[in-house]
Amino acid sequence: MDIHAPQPVGYAARLGLFSGTMLVVGGIIGSGIFLSPSVVAQRVGTAPLTLAAWGIGAVVAIIGGFVYAELGARRPQAGGTYVYLREAFGTLPAFLYGWALFLIMATGAIAAVAMTGASYLATLLGWAPENARAIAIALIVMLTLLNVLGVNIGATTGNVLTVLKLSAIAILVVAALIMSPANALPVPTVAAAPLMPPQGLTATVVAMGAALVPVLFSFGGWQQTNAVAEELRDPARTLPRALILGVLIVAATYLLVNVAYLRALGVAGLAASTAPAADTMFVYLGPAGRTLITCGIVASTIGFLGMVILMSARVYQAMAADGLFFQSMAALHPVTRTPVVALVAQGAVALVLLLTGTYGQLLDYVVFADWIFFGSTAATLFVLRRRDAHRDGPALVQAPGHPVTTLIFIAAAIYVVLGSIISNPGNAARGAGLLALGVPVYLYWNGRRTASRPPATP
């Protein structure tokens, strides 16, 4: 062994519990909580059922948080979901996750969220709407560059934006809970369709099931923090704590926001609103309230964008380190200790999707894939627990109620996937086709990896 040979560059463990928790919160709260509540109210038709839907979503998210917390404690490695799928089920499903993430799920989300944030920012600055795409390009480039410069810089930027978004949401909630309405909303020019609350148990179960699809999608995102495990200090302890704290913060935030919406707008007003957060702030604080919450939405979308850029690139790096993707993506910069090539490649694909305008359609095709991988990843806990049974002592964190709670989470994931397929079978078929395209790509990379291995010595 040559003691003078250069040592491979590894990740730097620079993030503590606060940054880890903000990664979880920032990775979940994007623009969904500002849009999805209207859809939920439309589907269930009453205030109690609206809050019940978000309560059920919170329970599922908390269960998922505990499942991922145990997985993170068992395998505190960069790559997160990719690593758990690889360890439990082999390299093909792990590769398909990374493939979908790189091709559409992360890059498409980056393009879509950048456009959302840019549109709100253009409105806030009084710029013409046609400037939104240029702003979105600048956001992707700037946030990618910040993440290239170091995980501390990327995470600190995300921390600031997450605190700002939580502050704006806190103002909204406090205003709705302690103030009296001061302004009436303008009467809409087009009358909203009357709400049709479900009658009877069967109808209620069906309506609640339909409402849970946007709720559970709004709660998605905590799993991404596991991808930066090696950049957390004492990851086997810090990652589980960050996951549990972050999911609890988001669950409380979502429930309080919906209480605020219902108090300000009523269930019919919430169902009819296209911008419930802005309408709620207008009711209590007038035009200044609209401006304030618009600032909060800008911070929320840009913060979410930065978190997706930071965390997703670690998956491609882990995949490349296994020989299943471009080898240049496996390298970490010797100074910044970041996966520079993976970050730049991710940004380039996101910009292509943005400039071609295909990101929305492609995301619709694979939106169900997120929950396929959520459910599959939860299932890895059964395999890893059995495989780790010979180790001394239990895991640092154990998902409470396993296996029942884990099965509940898997059932919720199956429900979301089936709901997505039933609601739009054409999109689901096209999304499945895009995933299937990853199989020959996997066979190519796996063949190259096998061919490059040195022959076994006799």
Image (cartoon, grey):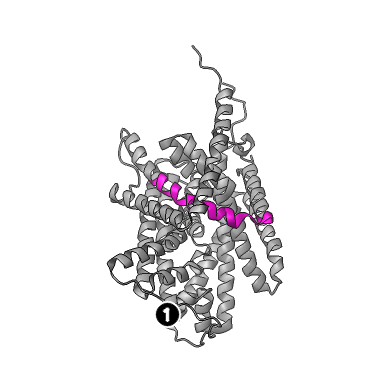
* Dominant secondary structure of the residues highlighted in magenta in the image: helix
**Extreme residue in the top direction:** 458
104 or 395, which is in the foreground?
104
120 or 43, which is in the foreground?
43
Left or right of 12, for residue 393: left
- The disc labelled 1 sits on which kind of residue? Gly
Q: Is residue 423 above or below residue 458?
A: below
Q: Is residue 218 above or below residue 107?
A: below
Can the viewer see residue 330?
Answer: yes
The residue under the point 50% across, 62% down is 29
**Extreme residue in the front direction:** 426
57 or 142, which is in the foreground?
57
Locate residue 350, reporting x and y percent: 64, 52
Quarter of the rendering containing residue 122: bottom right
Can the viewer see residue 243?
Answer: no
Locate residue 231, reporting x and y percent: 52, 46
Q: Is residue 331 above or below residue 225?
A: above
Left or right of 400, for residue 3: right
The residue under the point 57% across, 63% down is 301
Give the extent of the magenta segment. Answer: 354-378
Locate residue 215, reporting x and y percent: 43, 63
> Few, some or many C-alpha atoms within 10 Å of disc 1 (few <14, some 14-19, many ≥20)?
some
Element carrying mark 1: helix
The residue under the point 58% across, 82% down is 287
The stretch drawn in magenta includes residue 226: no
Locate residue 138, reporting x and y percent: 69, 59
Q: Which image quadrant: the N terminus? A: top right
The stretch drawn in magenta includes residue 367: yes
Left or right of 249, for residue 366: right
28 or 238, which is in the foreground?
28
**Where does label 1 land, which residue?**
266
